[in-house]
Image (tube, rainbow, N blue to C red):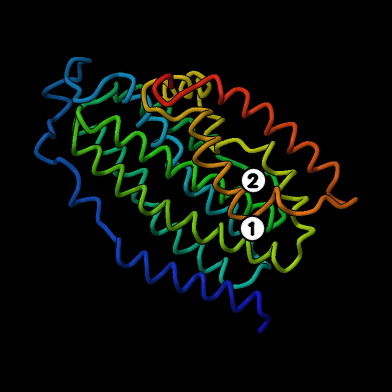
Amino acid sequence: MSHLDSTLDTLYERHLELSNKVDWGYHNLLPWERGRNFNDDPWSPDQGTISPELTVAVETAMLTEVNLPWFTSGLNAVFADAPSAFRNFVHTWTREEDQHGRILDVYLLLSRNGEPEMRDRIRKNVIGTGWNIEDSDPFSVMVYTSLQELATRVFYLNLARAAETQDPVLSKILRVIAKDETLHYAFYRDAAKAYIDEDPSRIATVCRIIPQFVMPGFGMPNFRQRLQVIAKYANYGIYAYYQNVLKVVLEFWGVLQYDVSSGTRDARHTLDQYLTKLQRIAGRQTPAAE
């Protein structure tokens, strides 16, 4: 067994140990007492427990999470010939992620936040459209998933804080989901770091992936408008992404500290331009403004 394989196995075992400590069942967190029959008591906009803006944020999260079958299929294909730790992790990750979309969907129904018929149509459309992974290189996907999992964690925690005064039950649900995302991020982040340490030239791939990064929900209807609502009312926009996601990952991997070689010069230049642009946009925003 190579040193890299051994490191990945250790990371996977660590994940299992930590995830077992935070394991949860969605049946214990949902407000079942709020449930009513929609046939006997039709939905109306005044029945919700949170603002329409926070409802959009929770719906967007749910509509992203429900594409889990497609995410799993894509990751299985990418890691088919990768070390076994990745294949094992994808199965464990799927088991843990399965509850996220379900608990958010059922919460919205029980608490009557958002129009259920419209959301049902959008959910079916999103799942029917599916999702295709755009890169077949395992390391590239590690970089992407590191960013995606950390971004999701920060989003859920910011949304939990925004929901605290409107519905503490929702806030608790979001914080529990964020714990899963924290552990998923840690696995991919440390796995990517192990690959970089083995071959520092992989920094060029990191520099290439970061400017192309978009969240996997970008294909859902009105995604850009949804992001604007989330930035304003759930405090997760460009500022939060730049400060709490991108800078964190770049520092952990030490990307900006690596010497620029001939093989990484173009990719690093593209990254530097991207960071300058993002920093300028983020500088015009504050957490309060978002």
Give the alpha-carbon distance from disc 2 to disc 1, as whole Å. Answer: 9 Å
Q: Earlier in the sequence, mark 2 or mark 1?
A: 1
Q: Secondary structure at mark 2?
A: loop
Residue 57 spot, x, y in % from top left? 38, 28
Tell me which residue sits at (69%, 51%) in the image.
255
Residue type pointed to by label 1? Ala
Vertical relation: 276 (above or below) 106:
above
**How packed is label 2: few (under 14 Cα within 10 Å), some, or many (20 or more)?**
some
Residue 229 spot, x, y in % from top left? 42, 20
- Dividing the picture into quadrants, the one containing residue 92 is bottom left
Residue 62, labelled with which disc?
Answer: none
Tell me which residue sits at (63%, 71%) in the image.
83
Q: Secondary structure at mark 1?
A: helix
**How packed is label 1: few (under 14 Cα within 10 Å), some, or many (20 or more)?**
some
- Dividing the picture into quadrants, the one containing residue 85 is bottom right
Tell me which residue sits at (76%, 61%) in the image.
200
Which residue reaches farthest left? 33
- 233 or 135, which lies in front? 233
- 59 or 268, which lies in front? 268
CB under 8 Å between callouts 2 and 1?
A: yes
Quarter holding the C terminus?
top left
Residue 210 spot, x, y in % from top left? 67, 41
Q: Is residue 225 left or right of residue 275?
A: left
Q: Which residue is mark 1?
A: 77
Q: Which residue is mark 2?
A: 133
- Dividing the picture into quadrants, the one containing residue 246 is top right
Which residue reaches farthest bottom? 1
